[in-house]
Image (cartoon, helix red, strand yellow):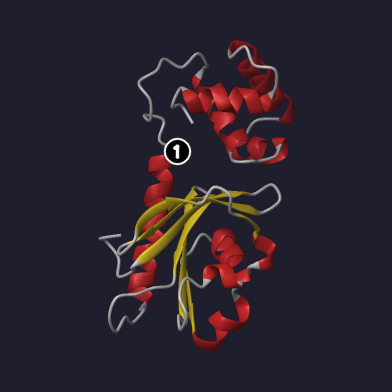
Amino acid sequence: MHSFPVKNGLLLRYSPMGHIGQGIISINIDEGYKFITHYVEDLRNVPIIMQALQERRARYVKGIDYLTSMPSRYVSREGSEQFIVVPIFHGNVSIGYICGDEFEGNFQMSSTLLETFTSFGRLTGELFMSKKQGDNVCPLSKRELEVMQHVALGESTKEIAAAIQISDLTVNQYIKSAIKKLNAQNRVEAIVKLCKLGLI
């Protein structure tokens, strides 16, 4: 909030499966923060956000483009006529986004500032996906953990295989092995356990 000329921000996670955005936290410089986990949105209904996530580039709209294309829940105050969305991504995968519509003073967007916002989203994504997140010992091999990180992003077996250049069969073997080592019943439970260990 102190790094950019915005007065408010929504932080949301993004699931490529179903193109769902789910709220995490809302921050306002004047009002503090609140959790917004009840908030869920099919982002196919919000083309500005969907485009930013697909292109992994910050997007800014104002005026009539903003007023005609944004659902009312994204308008935080009456008279707001501009909006920014910053995708949080790692590699080719968007994992969340930050958006806001209240700006400081006589704010003017520039291409340089948009690139700065995009870089912020990339660096944040790298931080979230860092393998150094937890001090816990990982029960998985390096490759198993890598595959499970891709699973956590909602990627399909084919997408994982293409991303790390192994066969679909090998991807499935790594997933089965990881589930067994984590003493989990399925992929979802395995991901939850890895999250609790701070490994995802």
Give x and y (percent) for residue 187: 67, 26
The residue at 55%/33% (across/down) is: 149
Label 1 amino acid? Met
Total labels drawn: 1
Please name the residue shown 65% across and 41% down the image.
155
Residue lying at the far front of the rendered structure? 31
Residue occupying image coordinates x 55% and y 88%: 64
Whether 52 is drawn above or below 111: the answer is above
Can you identify the residue that label 1 sits on?
129
Task: Tell which of 109 and 107 is nearer to you.
Answer: 107
Q: Quadrant of residue 154?
A: top right
Q: Which is more toward the observer, 160 or 184?
A: 184
Q: Residue 150: x percent and y percent? A: 58, 36
- In which quarter of the view is residue 43 placed? bottom right
The percent coordinates of residue 21 (x first, y second) are 60, 54
Placement of 106 over or under 122, stated as above or below: below
Mark 1 nearby-residue class (10 Å; few <14, some 14–19, many ≥20): some
Nearest the camera: 1 or 18? 1
Q: Seen in the image, is 157 located left or right of residue 114?
A: right
Q: Which structural element holds mark 1? A: helix
Say above or below: 177 vs 64. Answer: above
Outermost residue, left side: 2
Image quadrant where one finds the N terminus = bottom left
Of residues 77 and 52, which is closer to you in this image? 77
Residue 184, compared with residue 45, is above or below; it is above
Residue 175 falls left or right of residue 134: right
Where residue 198 appears, x then y in whole percent? 43, 27
| Residue at 66% from the left image edge and 23% from the top image edge | 175
Left of 106 or right of it: where is 23?
A: right
Residue most extreme to the bottom:
64
